[in-house]
Amino acid sequence: MGRLDGKVAIVTGGAQGLGRADCEALIAEGARVLVTDINAEAGERLVRELNARRDGCAKFLRHDVTDEAQWVVAIDSAVATFGGLHILVNNAGIVIPATPEDTTLEQYRKHNAIMNEGTFLGCKHAIPAMAKSGGGSIINVSSVASHLGYPVFFAYTAAKGAVRAMTKSIAVWCQMQKYGIRCNSIHPGATDTPMLDAANKQLGLTEEFYTNSGPGLAKPEDIANVVVFLASDESRFVNGAEILIDNAAVIQ
Ligand SMILES: NC(=O)c1ccc[n+]([C@@H]2O[C@H](COP(=O)([O-])OP(=O)(O)OC[C@H]3O[C@@H](n4cnc5c(N)ncnc54)[C@H](O)[C@@H]3O)[C@@H](O)[C@H]2O)c1
């Protein structure tokens, strides 16, 4: 028996990094997953690997989270393929290092289009499908950047702050409507993924920087383990919470 037997999930930005680890962990616990991403090649490759482990557990859809019409297609596709929707992981994201003075309006809007607006659109369109499916769990991937002053990731911090805040309103709304849908945000610290690798290269940072500054680097599966808990009925009374997964980085 898996902890997520019979559940259907959508994971955005699922082709690599944290999203990929989430897909693997959700499937290992019995869920079926619509993996969505703008990177179709990596997404299709992952889905082939996942289906080789358990036939029919995964499908890929090219899906840009900034596009509302594509959200409608994604939700319909999960329901049509797997028969419902119970879990949404709003994971897709980008980071372009730039300070408040250097950030262009275009960069600021791009971060917000993907992470702030993308998360909003995902929640908005998933809620009715989840309610029809008997309830569910939305997991919004924010960051410790929503708690800290992080001037080199200025636009990123703003977008992640919006994700943190909107999560609470969605949680309260769904509770008031008696939908049986919970909504929580997770706040990873620095995690070993292609995104962090690229940012490190741009900023001239090495892994030692994270180890020497205290908490070290999380592995994607450290985050995925919490996603599985929030996706499962074990967390049925956890709603509107923000869960730091940062080895005490924020409170140090
Ligand atoms: N890695 C970290 O240190 C860290 C820490 C805290 C939070 N996060 C958050 O975790 C999430 C995943 O990050 P990651 O480190 O795995 O990054 P990543 O770059 O390795 O993966 C992100 C994925 O999102 C996809 N994506 C980008 N724009 C998209 C769009 N418009 N529509 C759909 N997909 C899109 C990319 O193609 C990629 O596959 C992000 O929201 C990130 O902000 C990461």
Image: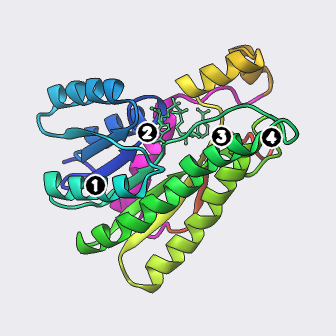
Q: Is residue 250 magenta?
A: no
Q: Which residue is mark 1?
A: 73
The location of residue 137, given as percent across then percent down, is 39, 62
Upstream in sequence: badge 3 or badge 1? 1
Q: Is mark 3 within 8 Å of ligand 1?
A: no
Contact check, label 1 and label 4, Cβ < 8 Å:
no
Q: Quadrant of residue 204?
A: top right
Question: Is residue 119 visible to the viewer in this orientation of the structure?
Answer: yes
Q: Is mark 2 within 8 Å of ligand 1?
A: yes
* Viewer-nearest of discs 2 and 3: 2
C-alpha span from label 3 to label 4: 15 Å
Q: Quadrant of residue 40?
A: top left
Callout 4: few (<14), some (14-19), or many (20+) C-alpha neighbours within 10 Å?
some
Contact check, label 2 and label 1, Cβ < 8 Å:
no
The quadrant of the picture occupied by the C terminus is: top right
Q: Residue at x 23, y 69 (%)?
A: 133
Q: Which residue is mark 4?
A: 150
Residue at the far right: name it. 101
Q: Which residue is mark 3?
A: 246
Contact check, label 2 and label 3, Cβ < 8 Å:
no
Residue 68 horizontal side relative to residue 166, left or right: left
* Residue type at the position of mark 1: Val
* Residue type at the position of mark 2: Gly
Q: Quadrant of residue 169?
A: bottom right
C-alpha span from label 1 to label 4: 35 Å
